[in-house]
Image (cartoon, rainbow, N blue to C red):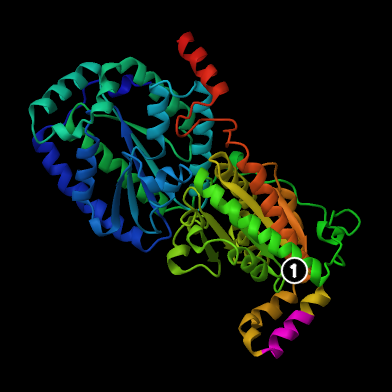
């Protein structure tokens, strides 16, 4: 597939000078139009060594207004990045709407390197590439434009370029020692690259193969391709991918057909005051010990709290935070998105708060707002909240696969109990801040929220991230059930090391079964 990048295309100095001036003018005009749009642009730059990727990026920054462009190089992982799921570092680099982000290697760099070095099998590589395809589709469905460039050249041209770079003291730093090995095994690296490109070359996110032998031809080709991609997207609606954007059928809505999980909860369950005090003291001591054990084992924990208004989320969270050392956790209250958050994909603001290894993040409301309040109140379109179920389950699967201990709680109360708590909040001065006009408006839509909650649980309670439904009419019972569930899950999870499930091992861990398969695959080659 790389034959088209080895034909020897070139551009003379005179033609380059003429074309560059016009191209730069048009790129700046397109960038001005981009700023007033909802379109974030992600440019992925990858390819063989010595193809001039850095030169191209510097050229783009020269041609464009750098106030609207950010460049990210994913070389060595920082401690912060190593202690979080792999895609965390990329979500932090996502551009706001109307801006451009240039990513060196991006999410393709590590999978390519690991397969080339034999740290994963073809099957593991394909599993990771499937995740990448899902990520790109999700971003594009949220109106992002992804432009992927692969720079290639013949082996002879690469050797000549490397020799040239070795003689130039200013360029030697560009060739990192571990990357130079790729050029020593040109055919093997090309084979891995071909597999990656074929697997991830989709109509909504195609690869552009650029011949890199001639610098002037290379730079003009990239500039023209980027210009065409931005103009095309600005002049039309976001591309549709009907074959990949299918959603499940609606759940039945008739009273007899719908399985209403919330109706099955026994809201009369309660604890006596003495039993509550005894269990609370015991469980808080246990959760404190487990939190320190998780810290020592570098296992991070994510706790998600959802529920009806006045359902007891805050009280349950306080019983946890009162027991755990404040240095080990962060509580994230989730309200309406800020302007900065609205300028990104809705999952962006949750990715950025994921805990470091050994720490805990508690989300007071979460990414499930997309299929609850945004669905019921019409803040999300029908297609947006419908596809969110699969986006959320894939997101949570990535967390669990990376070793995160994930627990999700829905705290439920009856309508009568909610009314009682609302009135109590209005009468008690220090509780008045908790009740708003919005709470009363949401109460009027109880049936719609009930239907949304039921579908949320049905579609997103999975083996790796199950929902715990909490009977919340009796606050002591609800708080103890939450603490018991956390202690039981932490205890069981910390007794065993996190085992990667299917797919690519992002850190190249030597899991026994995966290691055997790697050796078989490499021997077969």
**Main SS of residues in magenta:** helix
User: In the picture shown, does residue 99 fall above or below 78?
Assistant: below
User: In the picture shown, does residue 300 fall above or below 198?
Assistant: below
Q: Residue furthest right?
A: 256
Label 1: which residue? 277
Helix, strand or loop under label 1: helix
Which residue is at 45% across, 52% downward? 236
Tell me if residue 425 is in the magenta stretch.
yes
In percent of width and height, residue 246 lies at: 65, 43
Can residue 145 be seen from the camera position used here? no
Q: In terms of depth relative to the viewer, which is nearer, 221 or 297?
A: 297
- In this picture, residue 347 sits left or right of residue 73: right
In percent of width and height, residue 276 lies at: 77, 67
Which residue is at 34% across, 61% downward? 35
Tell me if residue 8 is in the magenta stretch.
no
Can residue 297 be seen from the camera position used here? yes
The magenta segment: 420-428
Q: In terms of depth relative to the viewer, which is nearer, 51 or 516?
A: 516
In percent of width and height, residue 273 lies at: 80, 72
Which residue is at 54% across, 18% downward? 517
Q: In terms of depth relative to the viewer, which is nearer, 476 or 195?
A: 476
């Amino acid at each position: 597939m790389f034959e088209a990048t080895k034909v020897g295309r070139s551009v003379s100095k005179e033609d380059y000078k003429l074309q560059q001036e016009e191209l730069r003018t048009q790129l700046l005009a397109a960038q001005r139009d981009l700023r007033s749009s909802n379109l974030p642009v992600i440019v992925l730059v990858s390819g063989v060594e010595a193809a001039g990727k850095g030169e191209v990026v510097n050229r783009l920054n020269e041609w464009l207004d750098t106030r609207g462009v950010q460049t990210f190089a994913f070389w060595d992982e920082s401690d912060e990045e190593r202690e979080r799921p792999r895609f965390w570092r990329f979500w932090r680099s996502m551009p706001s709407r109307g801006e451009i982000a240039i990513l060196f290697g991006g999410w393709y760099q590590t999978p390519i390197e690991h397969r080339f070095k034999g740290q994963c099998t073809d099957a593991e590589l394909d599993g990771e590439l499937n995740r990448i395809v899902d990520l790109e589709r999700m971003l594009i469905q949220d109106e992002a434009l992804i432009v992927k460039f692969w720079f290639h050249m013949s082996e002879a041209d690469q050797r000549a370029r490397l020799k040239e770079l070795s003689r130039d003291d200013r360029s030697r730093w560009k060739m990192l020692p571990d990357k130079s090995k790729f050029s020593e095994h040109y055919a093997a690296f090309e084979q891995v690259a071909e597999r990656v490109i074929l697997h991830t070359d989709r109509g909504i996110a195609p690869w552009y193969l650029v011949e890199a032998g001639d610098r002037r031809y290379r730079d003009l080709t990239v500039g023209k391709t980027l210009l065409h991609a931005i103009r095309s997207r600005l002049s039309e609606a976001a591309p549709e991918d009907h074959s990949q954007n299918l959603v499940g059928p609606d759940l039945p809505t008739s009273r007899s057909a719908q399985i209403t999980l919330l109706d099955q909860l026994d809201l009369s369950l309660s604890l006596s005051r003495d039993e509550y005090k005894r269990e609370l003291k015991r469980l808080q001591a246990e959760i404190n010990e487990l939190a320190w054990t998780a810290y020592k084992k570098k296992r991070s924990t994510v706790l998600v709290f959802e529920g009806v208004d006045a359902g007891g989320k805050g009280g349950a969270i306080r019983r946890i935070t009162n027991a755990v050392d404040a240095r080990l956790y962060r509580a994230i209250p989730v309200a309406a998105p800020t302007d900065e958050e609205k300028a990104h994909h809705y999952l962006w603001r949750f990715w950025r708060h994921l805990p470091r290894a050994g720490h805990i993040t508690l989300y007071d409301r979460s990414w499930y707002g997309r299929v609850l309040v945004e669905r019921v109140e019409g803040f999300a379109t029908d297609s947006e909240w419908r596809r969110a179920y699969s986006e959320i389950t894939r997101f949570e699967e990535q967390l669990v696969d990376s070793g995160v201990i994930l627990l999700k709680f829905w705290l439920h109360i009856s309508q009568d109990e909610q009314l009682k708590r609302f009135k109590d909040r209005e009468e008690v001065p220090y509780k008045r801040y908790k009740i708003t006009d919005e709470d009363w408006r949401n109460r009027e839509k109880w049936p719609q929220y009930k239907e949304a909650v039921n579908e949320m649980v049905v579609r997103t309670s999975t083996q790796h991230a199950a929902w715990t439904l909490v009977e919340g009419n009796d606050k002591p019972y609800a708080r103890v059930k939450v603490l018991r569930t956390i202690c039981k899950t932490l205890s069981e999870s910390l007794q065993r090391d996190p085992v990667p499930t299917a797919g690519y091992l992002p850190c190249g861990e030597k899991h026994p079964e995966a290691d055997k398969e790697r050796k078989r695959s490499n021997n077969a080659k």
